[in-house]
Image: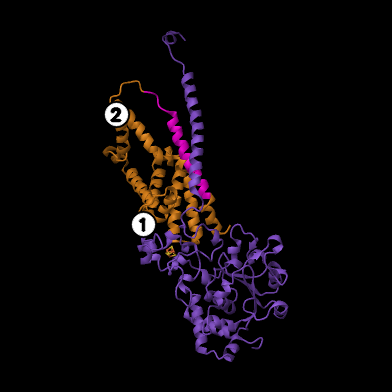
Chain colours: A purple, B orange
Amino acid sequence: MKKDQTIGEVLRERGISRRSFLKFCASTASLMALPPSMIPVIAATLEKARRPSVIWLSFQECTGCTESITRSDSSTLEDLIFNVISLDYHHTLQACAGHFAEHIREQVIKDNAGKYILIVDGSIPVKDGGVYSTIAGMSNEQILKETAAHAAAIVAVGTCSAYGGIPKADPNPTGAVSVSDLIKDKPIVNVPGCPPIPNVITGVLVQFLTFGLPELDALGRPKAFYGQSIHDRCYRRPFYDKGLFADSFDDEGARKGWCLYKLGCKGPTTYNACATEKWNFGTSFPIQAGHPCLGCSEPDFWDAGSFYSALSTPTENIGKTAIYATAGGLLAGAAIGGVLRARKQAAVKAHQRVTIDDLDKES
Amino acid sequence: MTDAEFLLWVRGPAFNIALFIMLAGIVVRFMEILLMGRKTNLAEARGSEMAGGLNTIWRRTLPDADTFRRSGFTIIAGNVFHIGLFVVIFLFVPHILVFERLFGVSWAGLPSNIVDATTVVTIVALLAVLVHRVKDPVLRMLSNFSDYLAWLVTILPLITGWLAFNRVGLSGSTLIGLHILSVELLMVLFPFTKLSHAFTLVLARWYNGAIAGYKGVQS
Ligand code: SF4
């Protein structure tokens, strides 16, 4: 594949038909909730766009995000996207290793300065000089800063790189932080999820190539994919509204497919496309499989109380609080009550009795 | 603070603080009343204190015809928002889950959309009593800051709860967080404003009834 080819040229060279390309554009448009009239626009723009060079850096992560984006065989959209970007550096997917691999990264930065897209998965440990994760003798923070310096934009894939994720979970032993905690001068698009939906990762890239930097929500996520909560698009929502809930994982409610709120569902506070986009080629998503949403695309989801306690319930040990409060109340009540009683008795004592003599006295 | 952190804070430390203040406050208020004690009545009893007390606790719940004629609006609107509050607080499933965590017991709830409709009726009734309070010259004169404060902290959780349930405007976490926070405000002020009548009313009615019962008269 020659450098600087347009995506259209690459597709033609690889024998991908116009029909399947348009199909890809149509599903991307529907993923972004765009009207059908936008399909030709996406197609035309994508065809003319240059295949951007992409550097993918993996830090403190479990490779689940990469697993997610590679969950595709040759005929899927995801694969198509691998044809439209030039993935030049990726630990898990690249064939080369050692100095050679690092050399490629440096070369890509040099050749494409200001033009390449940097994708990051995994959080960055900053405690103790970043010793908890190093690559080629460099800390993750050093590599990130060096690579980000000349990137056109950064896509933080997965909750770890977007918000710190599981490595940041209390007590955060490695001092894990997100990409946006360290990089302040580049456009950053967060694509959180543990892992994110494959089509959403690729969809964000297409959106980026077609329309430029997408519109983001307050947490840096593209609104096209993270604009609605799981709860608002959940097919179990009618049961929530009717007050029909599963009480356990195998009761009648669970079998009838009722709402999983009581079992700890975080759908009402979670923004992601699972309920509409689904997983494994649109087969299912956690709630459909009978498990409450964990809220994995939200910051600190790991520390948001138990996965299995309902959203409305307190997260701390309230039994203890109740005991301390009652004990404290009894003590304070006894003290205040004692003072009031003493005052009352003093008032009774100070009360001057009127005698017959007093009444006889002439004033 | 992100909205996720905000929600975590209101469900965690803030709820703990509010619960502590509310429970300790209620215990203090009870102790204050009970420790003050009552003067021993040296007169001979002409009836039962207990029967009079219990009877009054019940009887004061029902308006007599005369009071109804004079303050029909207050009684109807008052009953509507009190029953509404009961339904909304105790029969909404996500709330029952909180009580279950607190007391270890749970009960059946109502369909969420019925609670939703009840919330609207309760809000309307509370607005009506506020308008009445401001318009009626006598009531207005009798009202002070704490009356308006009690009204505000009662209606706020209803409004924020309705917004959270219907998911209006802000993000899910922010809406639920604001709702819980408004409930915490209510919890903190509960023992120290006239809202404490929710638990002192039983004592007050009992004392009234018992005094009358002892004298052998109707209270
Ligand atoms: S299962 Fe979860 S997301 Fe679906 S309606 Fe119930 S609470 Fe909402």
Decide if ligand 1 comes within 8 Å of the CB at mark 2.
no
Label 2 – label 1 distance at C-alpha: 45 Å
Label 1: chain letter? B
Q: Position of residue A136 (x, y in %)?
A: 71, 72
* Mark drawn on residue B48: 2
Circle 1: residue type:
Ala
> Which tag, 2 or 1, sits closer to the chain's start?
2
Label 2: chain letter? B
At mark 2, the secondary structure is loop
Seen in the picture, residue A136 relative to B156 is either above or below; the reply is below
Residue that appears at 55% across and 91% down: A15
Specify whether residue B178 is painted magenta.
Answer: no
Q: Position of residue A156 (x, y in %)?
A: 61, 70
Residue B103 seen in render? yes
Left or right, A71 with reference to B72: right
Name the residue beneath numbered marker 1.
B117
Please tell me how many numbered marks the rendered image carries: 2
Ligand 1: quadrant of the figure: bottom left
Specify whether residue B28 is painted magenta.
Answer: yes
Left or right, A54 with reference to B20: right
In the image, B91 versus B132, the foreground residue is: B91
In the image, A356 versus A270, the foreground residue is: A270
- Label 1 packing within 10 angstroms: few (<14), some (14-19), many (20+): few
Residue A106 seen in render? no
Farthest residue toward the left?
B65
Circle 2: residue type:
Ser
Q: Position of residue A255 (x, y in %)?
A: 37, 66
Residue B71, image quadrant: top left
Where, quadrant-wise, is the N terminus of chain A in this rendering?
bottom right
Which residues, given as a range, are shown in magenta? B14-40
Decide if ligand 1 comes within 8 Å of the CB at mark 1.
no
Residue that appears at 54% across and 82% down: A42
